[in-house]
Amino acid sequence: MTRSTQISAPISEETKDLLEKYVKATGIKKGHLIESALRYHLRALHELPADVLVPARLVLTRQSFKDVADRISSPGTPTDELRDLMSGDGD
């Protein structure tokens, strides 16, 4: 059996609340859930190319945030290629 060790890491209140709700609903132990999630994440980082990994959190400058907000509030006209893709008729 593998020896266990304890680690400590600060997490957001939101993440803690999600963790608490999940373990309460499923009966899974916190340590098991955290160990499984961490192993899964580390395996993905090792096996997947870096360019396909999307960070869980993006940090934007004020200007880039404004640019994103502007694009969301005033989206452009979809291209024919996008319409075809979203229709599900093509390959």
Image (cartoon, rainbow, N blue to C red):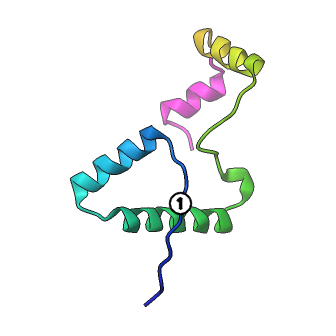
Is residue 76 shown to the viewer in this render?
no
The image quadrant where one finds the N terminus is bottom left
The residue positioned 48% from the left and 85% from the top of the image is 3
Is residue 34 shown to the viewer in this render?
yes
Q: Residues within 10 Å of mark 1 (few under 14, many from 20)?
A: few
Q: Quadrant of residue 56?
A: top right
- Residue 87 at what x, y percent from top left? 49, 30
- Residue 88 at what x, y percent from top left? 49, 36
Magenta-colored stretch includes residue 81 = yes
Residue sitting at the far top: 74
**Nearer to the camera, 49 or 28:** 28
Q: Quadrant of residue 55?
A: top right
- Which residue in the structure is indicated by mark 1? 8
Amino acid type of the residue tagged 1 in the rendering: Ser
The residue positioned 73% from the left and 56% from the top of the image is 50
Q: Is residue 55 left or right of residue 88?
A: right
Q: Is residue 70 left or right of residue 7?
A: right
The residue positioned 54% from the left and 49% from the top of the image is 10
**Nearer to the camera, 58 or 21:** 21
| Magenta highlight range | 77-91
**Nearer to the camera, 43 or 49:** 43
Magenta-colored stretch includes residue 70 = no
The image quadrant where one finds the C terminus is top right
Residue sitting at the far bottom: 1
> 66 above or below 16?
above
Mark 1 residue element: loop
The residue positioned 44% from the left and 39% from the top of the image is 13
- Residue 24 at what x, y percent from top left? 24, 53
